[in-house]
């Protein structure tokens, strides 16, 4: 069971110029007060076949985290053009938001990002040298979410009173726990669990 569940990631500047910072709001629910901060990282993947070219754009710590629905705004730097191979600038790349607790990744939210020129002439006949100041990015609104089971150092708050004569039973999932038909999801065990 995950103690923290992402409810929404809203990009506040999408579409945007390629060289603009990423600005978004993350809303999540926490079912137990956490002893330590959550760490969030934003990663740009220009070349899926070469992890060495991945760029960590920013990270932040969020805490203390109380029980309930919480949100924060995150601003990440744009990717460094010098670290992107010219053949990987235009077209589709990936943007990944990760959430970790005590150095254990519990969620990864991936988005496709399309990068193109901001005018039809350059789209139809791209210049031989990339002109980053003329590029725009558009982030897909349908993420791919992967959850990982980790060892949380807290337990969810559970009501301890039971009405006389009532039987105890397993928790029933709410509608919020059910997958959206459009959302693709994987659940992966973490290493060492």
Image (spheres, grey):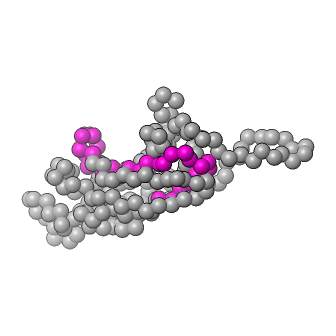
Residue in view at x 54 percent, y 53 percent: 65
Judged left or right of residue 142, residue 94 is: left
- Please state the horizontal and vertical placement of residue 88, each as a whole percent of the image: 21, 51
Give 49 or 19, whichever is nearer the viewer.
19
Which quadrant holds the N terminus? top right
Total marks placed: 0
Q: Residue at x 39, y 53 (%)?
A: 60
Residue 155 figure quarter: top right
- Tell me residue 156's x, y (percent): 65, 45
Residue extending farthest left: 128
Q: Is residue 69 visible?
A: yes
**Residue 181, placed above or below residue 132:** above
User: Residue 48 versus residue 122: which sits nearer the camera?
Assistant: 48
The quarter of the displayed image where residue 168 is located: top right
Q: Is residue 153 above or below residue 59?
A: above
**Which span of residues is magenta-colored?**
26-54
- Verify whether residue 23 appears in magenta: no
Q: Residue 30 appears at what percent x and percent y? A: 58, 51
Q: Is residue 110 visible?
A: no
Q: Residue furthest top?
A: 192
> Measured along the vertical axis of the image, is residue 53 above or below residue 183?
above
Q: Position of residue 45 (x, y in %)?
A: 29, 48
Which residue sits at x=43%, y=62%?
73
- The one nearer the camera, 40 or 117, is 40
User: In the image, what residue occupies the spot 46% across and 54% down?
Assistant: 62
């Amino acid at each position: 069971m995950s103690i923290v569940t992402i409810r929404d990631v809203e990009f506040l500047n999408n579409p945007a110029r390629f060289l603009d910072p990423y600005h978004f709001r993350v809303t999540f629910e926490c079912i137990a007060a956490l002893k330590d901060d959550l760490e969030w990282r934003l990663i740009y993947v220009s070349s899926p076949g070469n992890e060495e070219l991945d760029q960590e754009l920013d990270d932040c710590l969020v805490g203390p985290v109380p029980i309930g629905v919480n949100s924060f705004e995150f601003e990440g730097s744009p990717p460094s053009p010098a670290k992107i191979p010219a053949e990987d600038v235009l077209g589709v790349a990936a943007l990944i938001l990760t959430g970790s607790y005590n150095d254990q990744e519990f969620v990864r939210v991936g988005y496709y990002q399309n990068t193109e020129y901001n005018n039809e002439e350059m789209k139809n006949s791209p210049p031989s040298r990339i002109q980053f100041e003329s590029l725009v990015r558009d982030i897909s609104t349908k993420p791919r979410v992967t959850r990982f089971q980790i060892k949380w150092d807290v337990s969810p708050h559970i009501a301890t009173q039971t009405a006389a004569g009532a039987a105890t039973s397993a928790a029933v999932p709410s509608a919020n726990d059910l997958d959206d038909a459009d959302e693709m999801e994987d659940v992966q065990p973490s290493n060492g669990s």
